[in-house]
Image: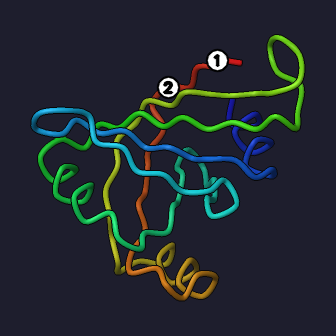
Amino acid sequence: MFEKIGNILKYEGVFSIVAKGDDFPHIVNSWNSYVSLKDNKLIVPVGFMNKMEEILKKDSRVIVVLGTKEIEGLYGMGMGVRILGTAKIVDNNEDFKKKKEEFEWARAVMIIEINEVIQTA
C-alpha cells in the first residue's frame, strides 16, 4: 500500500487530515505535492495548524484522506486512500530542516506514522 500512497503523491490533490476535536472533528488540508513519504511516515509542512497542534497533544490519532483522479483506482480513473495513524508536530529535526528549505513558510512539520491504509477508490 505504501507504493500506492507514493503514486498518489506524485499528482496534485487535496491532502486532508482529521483529528478528534473536543466537540466535533477538526480537519486541516494541505496538498499532495507538499507531502513526503519516508519509510512508514508522511511528512507534511506546517504553516498554521495551531488548533490541530493543540488537539494532537491530547490525542495523536488522525485519519488522512488523499487521492488523485490521474491514476487507475478500484473503479476506473481515480485512486483514493484513507490512512489511520498517529501524528505529532515538530520543529527541531532533519525532516523539518528539509521541508523548511523547500517551503520557507513552514514553521514545523507534521509527522504522521501510518498504522493502516485502506484503498477507497
Residue at 76 percent of width and 38 percent of height: 68
Q: 95 and 19: which one is in front?
A: 19
Element under disc 2: strand
The quarter in which the N terminus is drawn is top right
Counting labels gives 2
Residue furthest top as drawn: 75
Q: Residue at x 54, y 52 (%)?
A: 42
Image quarter (top left, top right, bottom left or bottom right) of the C terminus: top right
Q: How is the image coloured?
A: rainbow
Task: Tell me the mark number nearer the camera, choosing from 1 and 2.
Answer: 1
CB atoms of marks 1 and 2 within 8 Å: no
Using the image, determine if residue 57 lies above or below residue 25. Answer: below
Report the Cα–Cα distance between label 1 and label 2.
13 Å
Give the residue at the far front of this rendering. Answer: 24
Quarter where residue 108 is shown: bottom left
Quarter of the view holding residue 46: bottom left
* Residue matched to label 1: 120
Where does residue 14 sit, x and y in percent of width and height? 62, 47
How far across and down, in percent of the image, does residue 97 sit?
A: 50, 84
97 sits left or right of 85 in the view:
right
Residue 62, given in percent of the width and then of the height, sits at: 35, 38
> As shown in the figure, which amino acid type bears the numbered disc 1?
Thr
Q: Nearer the viewer, residue 29 or 118?
A: 29
Q: In the image, 40: left or right of 51?
A: right
Q: Which mark is residue 100?
A: none
- Which residue is the site of mark 2? 116
**Relative horizontal placement of residue 105, taking residue 3 as reference (left or right):** left
Mark 1 element type: loop
Which amino acid, by three-letter code, is at mark 2?
Glu
Residue 48: give x, y in percent of width and height: 35, 71
> Residue 22 sits in which quadrant?
top left
